[in-house]
Every structure is written in structure tokens, then in C-alpha cells.
Image: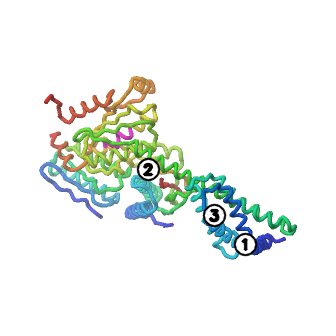
Amino acid sequence: MDRVPILKIGSTLFVSIQIDLQDESVMLLQEDLADELSATGARGVIIDITAVEIVDSFIGRMLTMIGSISRLFDAETVIVGMRPAVAITLTELGLSLSGVRTALNAEKGLEILNGKS
Amino acid sequence: MDELPIQSGDDVVRVRQQVRTVAAKNGLSLVDQTKLVTAASELARNTLVHGGGGVAKVEVVKSVNGRSGVKLHFTDEGPGIADLDLALTDGWTTGGGLGLGLSGARRLVDEFELNSKPGAGTSVMVVKWSR
Amino acid sequence: MDADDTRKRMADYLRDHHDKVIGRWTELVVSGMRGRTSVEEVRRELGDLFTLIVRVLSEADDHAAGELQAALDELSRSRARDGFTPSETALGVFALKEAVYELVADTSELVPEFLAFSRMVDNLGLSTFEAYSAAREQIISDQVTTMMELSTPVVQLWDGIIAVPLVGTLDSARTQLVMEKLLDTLVATGADHAVIDITGVATVDTEVAQHLLKTVSAARLLGAECTISGIRPQVAQTIVSLGIEFGDIATKANLADALALALRQAGLKVVPA
């Protein structure tokens, strides 16, 4: 089972999804992030999906849930690097990923997080 | 035509990759490829989670005016769907998350055919044409 | 009489009168083309078709029918490219019947053979019409694509602010294109604000509003904020009477106001030099 590594830099957790993830790996990521947020008191989470080619309703739901979980730990989540084709598909599916912020890349994502705190 | 088993999460990933390869080879634009693979992901997952596992068939087809397209067929011998209209409404669920699978998948493709009867399994056929 | 024998008898007859038939056929076709092609080229083309037709009739091999169809499709395409009408092309094929009839008319033996042959040529002529139609449809579809591409510019107004001036109709096909171009430009320029100007959109009904909402939704997934500008007075009234809600999307009367808003949101101010 592929576990997505979580990096901590300052008070931000970084996750970069590099491969075509299986459902179970996505659920594990959610658990691991909850653990890390609880353990570290991080204030922000950046999930980089630049390399992700498909975001279906399951993964979309997971991302929204990660946003909700983070908020419970008083942290903000920013999804960065969504590909145009993925954004268009998600819009067609009617998924707006409300509850998470989005940005073009990790740098802009950090600006949002720093602006917030 | 390729026939792929759907018995595990890894199989769902394999179906996605195969659909991507075939779609790219047959002239679908990047956005259309993404839409088709996303639909395939939804349907494959349904087959696994609600249908108890099944089979996916991937086929290249030609329209009357020479356009090529990709046809996908998902079948399972699971419990079937009792109320098809309800299943195709947005937000329907059989327990565990939002059931955006079927209605969402339908919006992403050009042709969509759903056949299911309680106790007789489910069959979903979709086609996406190149432009 | 056996259908196969009929066709084979016709095939033999045609083979025996090869030169006469092709000669007369060429004459008829060229006169119908009013000097727009060279006689030699036409003779060669028709000669090839003739050979294929004879092969199909004599059922010499399985490939003949496919090759004949391919040759007819190519004839149809090249005539269309040279500006001939589909009728001219089809009439050219039909002329083969006339050429053969002139020879057969004197002998009263080949009537059933000629009838069957005549029917076959009719189908061949009609298939050139079908091929022409299909080719025109492809051209039209390509032109529509080009037109859509050209009428969907995405321009950069300022650092981080881009604009999409929409002109004409906004149907679902156009919306797809707008979304793709807008999102690609957001990625390419790193912009975080997009202004969608609908001054040039003639009608804004529920469908158009949905398309706009979809476009804004997609841009937001890439972290960009959107403003819709160019709301004309009648359009504003229509939107309200239709009960369309733009929710939290900012809307402005014109592009200038939208730019001012975007600059403000970016923390920029324009001051006299």
C-alpha cells in the first residue's frame, strides 16, 4: 500500500500526490493528516495535485473531508496545482470542493496561508 | 477490445490507465480523455463496491460519419439497482458518501446506457466520441 | 437465370468492349465538365474505375468491392476539391450506363444483364453523393472549430489579471472552449483574477448563466477569482426576472469597473504620474 509522505515545514504540512492513487491510499492519507495535525499543531496544509490526472467524486470528497478535518484542528487547507482538464471535469461533475481553498501552486498556497494567520 | 477484471482497488487503477491509453490513441482531446477516465473511475468503483466485483470492457468504435470513439462496458452480478431513476438523480446514496457516481459519469460522456434489475446485476455502457 | 451468371456475362461483355466503353464514357464525362479538367486525366481515372467495376462484376476477388468504394470516395473528394458539384460527379458516374447502353441497344440479348448493371451503377453514383456530403460536413465542422478558436481571445490586462471578452453566443461547445483557454492562460500567466466580459453576448438566459457559473467555478478551482462585467441594462432585468442568482460572484457594468475592482483586490492603486 502506497503511503503518501507528509512533510512539515514551519507550521505547514506539505503533501505532494505523485501517482495514480488507489482509494485505500487516499483514505490512509486522510488518517495520516489527522494524526499529524493533532501531533504537530500545524496551522496549514498544502496538498499539491500538480501530478494528479484524475480527480473523481471519491477523491473529491476526500479532499473536502480533509478540509473539514483540518478546520477542526484550526488549520486551513489549500489544494494547489489542479490541472485545467481536472478542473473542467470536476465542474462538470458538479463538485466545487467548497471548504478548501485553491491556488495555482505551492508558493501561492503559502501566501494564502500566511495571509490568513 | 480489452477485457479487465475489477476485483480490487488496484484493478480500478488499472482500468483508469487502460482507458487513458486507449482514449489518447484514438484522438480524444486531453479534456475529453480526462472526462472519460474520470467516468471510468466512477463506474469501476461502483462495480467493485456496489456490484461485488465485475468486468470492464474497453473498445474502440467508429461513428457513421467516420469519427472514432471509445466505448466502455461495466458489468457485475451484484444485487442490482432497484430504482434506476433515483440512482441517476444527483446526490443519491446507498450508504457511505454521496452517490455522485452514476449521474456524474453520465454528464461526462456522450452516450450512456444503464441496465439493472434487483438480483440480476448491473450493466453500464458509455461512449465518448472524438471531436 | 442465376444472378451471378448475369453479372459475369456483363463483366465479359464490358471486358470485350473495354476501349469503346471507356472512350465514350470519357467523352460524356468531359462534355459535362465544361473544360475544367484534362481529357487524359479523366480517361485514366475512368479507366481505373472501369477495371474495378469489371472485377466486382466478375467476382474475381474479395477485395474488389472495397477498392471500388475507396476509389469512388477519392473521386468524390477530388472533384469536390476542384469545385465540382456533387451532381456533376454523380452524373459522371451515371454516364457509364449511357456509354454501355449505346453499344448494347443493338443487341437485344443483354437486357436482364444491363438492368442489373444499371442498378449497380446507380448505387455507385449515389455513393459519391454520400461521400461528398460527409466531406462537406467535416469541412463545416472544422470551420466552426476555427471560428470558435478565433473568437475566444484571452488577454492579460495587468500583472495577474486576465480578461475574456465573449462575443456572440455562449453555448455548451463554446463554454468548453472558453473554460479550456481561460484555465490554460491562468496557468501560463499565474494570474489570480479573471474578468469575463459579456458585453458582446446577445442573450443571457438561464442556460448562458449556467455556463458562466460553470466557467467561474472552474477558474476558482485554480485559485482565481472572477468578475463578470458587461452587464447591460436589459440583461440585468432579464437576469433578475429569470431568478438567476450569481451568488458571490462580483458583477460590474463594464470592463473598466471590473479592472478597477481587480486592481483594488490585488492591493494596487492607480495614481497620476
Determine the image quadrant of residue C36. bottom right
Say whether disc 3 or disc 1 marks the residue closer to the N-terminus.
Answer: 1
Q: Tell me the SS state at disc 3.
A: helix
Q: Specify the principal SS of the magenta part.
A: helix
Residue at the limit of the structure toward the left, as seen here? A10
Q: Amino acid at mark 2?
A: Gly
Cα gap from disc 2 to disc 1, whole angstroms: 65 Å
Residue B30 position within the rendered picture, expressed as x and y whole percent measured from the top left: 39, 55
For the residue marked with disc 1, what is the amino acid?
His
Which tag is nearer the camera, tag 3 or tag 1?
A: 3
Looking at the image, is mark 2 or mark 1 nearer the viewer? 1
> Is residue C16 found left or right of C246 in the rendered image?
right
* Segment colored magenta: C213-220
- Label 3, on which residue? C39
- Report the disc number at residue C232: none
Q: In the shown orientation, is residue C96 left or right of residue B19?
A: right
Was residue A56 drawn as part of the magenta stretch in this picture? Answer: no
| Residue B65 on image: x %, y % | 57, 55
Which residue extends farthest bottom?
C60
Q: What x and y, as percent, mark residue B54?
A: 48, 62
- The subunit letter for the residue under badge 1 reads C
Quadrant housing the N terminus of chain C = bottom right
Q: Is residue A69 left or right of residue A22?
A: left
Of all chains, the one bearing label 2 is B
Q: Are marks 3 and 1 on the same chain?
A: yes
Reading the image, the residue beneath label 1 is: C18
* Residue in the foreground of this view, choosing between C190 and C106: C106
Marks 3 & 2, CB-CB < 8 Å contact: no
Find disc 2 in the rendering and name its residue.
Answer: B101
